[in-house]
Amino acid sequence: KTIIRSDVEFIIQNRVTQSVSFDESKIRRVLVNLLKNSYEAMKEKGIIRLDSLMDGNQLVFIVSDTGQGIPERIKANLFSPFQSEGKSQGTGLGLAITRKLVHEHKGTIEYKPNEPQGTIFIIKLPQ
């Protein structure tokens, strides 16, 4: 199911100029999960960003949005299976799978609030 909304701006900024190595299908799934979550969190107009850059020997992806943010009550278990918020469909496995795929790359994933509202997920993959 594809939903296009004219009130959500999508910005991609790639600052990676050298060759990098990762399992394309797995990291694509990671990014799609995060971008889909961001999109579904948009109750009204907003911005979703995907940035990529190098930080030393780490490839960094940053997915941020100006959506509803993550409720305080689920933050502690955010990456646990069956955590879902405000979706009529979904299993609550997206972030658990996302974290597993990142860990398979010996990487890290971190959540931070995007002030004044929204979310930021930072993925770091060693190169």
Image (cartoon, rainbow, N blue to C red):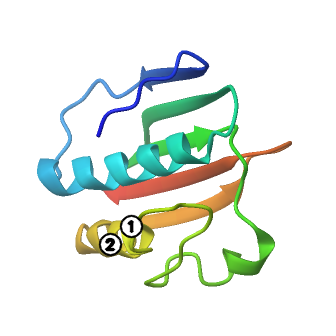
Quadrant of the rendered image containing residue 76: bottom right
In depth, the one of 5 and 58 nearer the eye is 5
Secondary structure beneath label 2: helix
Is residue 54 toward the left or the right of residue 65 in the image? left
23 left or right of 102? left
Task: From the viewer's side, name the closer residue of 6 and 113.
Answer: 6
In this view of the protein, which residue sits in the foreground, 101 or 15?
101
Residue displayed at 54% across by 15% down: 6
Task: Specify the label residue 97 is tagged with.
Answer: 2
The amino acid type of the residue labelled 1 equals Gly
In the image, is residue 117 above or below residue 50?
A: below
Q: Is residue 58 visible?
A: no
Residue found at the far top of this picture: 6
x then y, percent, for residue 11: 50, 21
Q: Is residue 106 left or right of residue 124?
A: left
Q: Position of residue 125 (x, y in %)?
A: 34, 57
What residue is disc 1 on? 94
Give the residue drawn at x 49%, y 84%.
Answer: 80
Asked if the residue at tag 2 contacts the one at tag 1, i.e. Cβ–Cβ closer than 8 Å, the answer is yes
Residue occupying the point 59% across, 41% down: 64
Location of residue 17 in the rendering, given as x and y in whole percent from the top left corner: 29, 23
Crowd rating for badge 1 (residues with CA inside 10 Å; few <14, some 14–19, many 20+): many
Image quadrant for the N terminus?
top left
